[in-house]
Image (spheres, grey):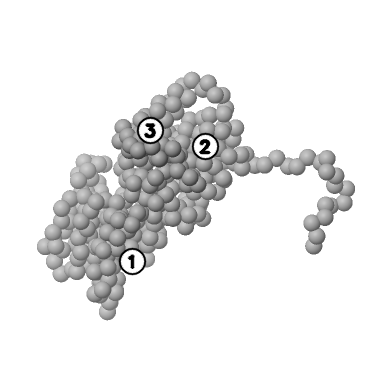
Amino acid sequence: MTNAEPAGATQSQAKPALPHFQKQKLFTIGLRCGRLANRLILFANFVGLAEEQGHRLINFTFHSYSEFFEGTRGNIYCRYPRPKRRSWLELVPGVAAFLRKTRIPYHLTRATSALNERYPVFGAAAVTLHELPGQHVTLLDGPEYQEKIRLARIVFVYGWWLRTPSLVKKHADKIRAYFRPVEKIESASRDAIEPLRRDADVVVGVHIRQGDYRGWFDGKYFFPVARYAAWMHELASQFPGRKVAFFVCSDEPRSLGEFPGLTVGLGAGPAVSDIYALARCDYIIGTKSTFTQWSSFYGGKPLLQVCGTAEAIKLENFRVSYLDWT
C-alpha cells in the first residue's frame, strides 16, 4: 500500500475539520472541594481528560498539597502537562512560597470564574461549568459537556461531581506518574508496610474514619472500632493457610489493643503518607470515602467500601476504583 492520493483528489480540496475537542483548551479548577483525597480525585479526572484530548490544565486549589507530589512540586501553576521549565515565580526566592501560603492565585481564579459566569465578557471563548442539571455525576467526555465547551478556549471548572472514569482507566499510568509522591512520602509509606510483609502472606489496609463521620449523613458511615475489628477477622478467615496482617490508619489515635487476635501495624500519619501506604497493601477496606478510593486507584488494589454495620465481607466484592464511585 502506498501513500498516493486517491484518484480524483486535488490539493485544493479542503481537509475535514478537526473534532472540537482537538482544539486545545485551558482548564482551570476554581473551586476547592474538601481535603487531600477529594482534590486528588477531581484533579486526576481532569488530567485524564487533558491527556485524551490534548488540553492544558492548571489547578491552584491544589497548592495546599503540591509539595508532596513529583508532578506539582516546583510547578507553581500545578499545571498538566508538566511545564518543560520552571516559572520565574519559582526561581525568585520567596515568591512561590508566598503565593501558595496566601492562596492569592486561587482566590483570583475563583473570583474570575464567578464573574465570568455572571458577566460573560469573553463570549463563548470562556465558560464557567458546574455539574449538569439533573445529573448526580457529570461525565466530562459525555456529549452534553463537550457541547458546552465546544467553542471555549478557557474553561473555568466550578464543581465536584465531574468524572471521566473511562479516561482515568485509559491513562492511569500517566496519572499515577504525575501524582507520584516525593521520596520522603514514598519512603514513609514503604516503611509502614514492609515490616508487615516480612511475616505475612497477605497485607490488608484498613482505613477507620471517625472524626467528621460522627455527624456526616447523621453518622450513617460511622462505625465503632470493634466493628472494623470484626470485619478484619471475617476477611482473615477467607485466606485459609495464609498469614494475614493488617495496616490500620485512622483520623483518630488508635492502639493495638483495639484489635485482639490480629496482626496489626498502625499508621502514624500524616494523611498523605497513610493514603500511599494503603496503596501498597494487597486489599483495602474502609467505609464510603475518597481516601480509600485514591489508594485503590493509585496502587491498583481491590477495595471494599462497607456502608452498613450488617454488611458482610466477601472477597468477590472487592474491586479497583477508577475514581468514579459516589
Secondary structure of the residue carrying numbered label 2: strand
Residue 322 % position (x, y): 43, 54
Q: Amino acid at mark 3?
A: Tyr
Say which residue appears at 45% left-offset and 39% top-offset: 87
Q: Nearer the viewer, residue 53 or 216?
A: 53
Task: Give the residue furthest to the left.
Answer: 257
Q: Are marks 2 and 3 in contact (CB under 8 Å)?
A: no
Mark 1 packing: few (<14 Cα in 10 Å), some, or many (20+)? Answer: some
Q: Amino acid at mark 2?
A: Leu
Res 26 label: 2
Q: Nearer the viewer, residue 240 or 196?
A: 196
Say which residue appears at 37% left-offset and 66% top-offset: 316
- Name the image quarter holding residue 319: bottom left
Secondary structure of the residue carrying numbered label 3: helix
Instruction: Point out the image quarter for the N terminus.
Output: bottom right
Residue 260 vs residue 50: left or right?
A: left
Residue corresponding to mark 3: 106
Q: Nearer the viewer, residue 77 or 231?
A: 77
- Name the image quarter holding residue 214: top left
Q: Please, is residue 237 above or below residue 291 in the view?
A: below
Mark 3 packing: few (<14 Cα in 10 Å), some, or many (20+)? Answer: many
Say which residue appears at 46% left-offset and 21% top-offset: 118
Secondary structure of the residue carrying numbered label 1: loop
Residue 212 % position (x, y): 22, 43
Residue 18 % position (x, y): 67, 42
Nearest to N terminus: mark 2 or mark 3: 2
Task: Give the residue furthest to the bottom.
Answer: 241
Residue 91 vs residue 14: left or right?
A: left
Nearest to N terminus: mark 1 or mark 2: 2
Q: CA distance from mark 3 to mark 1?
A: 37 Å
Residue corresponding to mark 1: 282
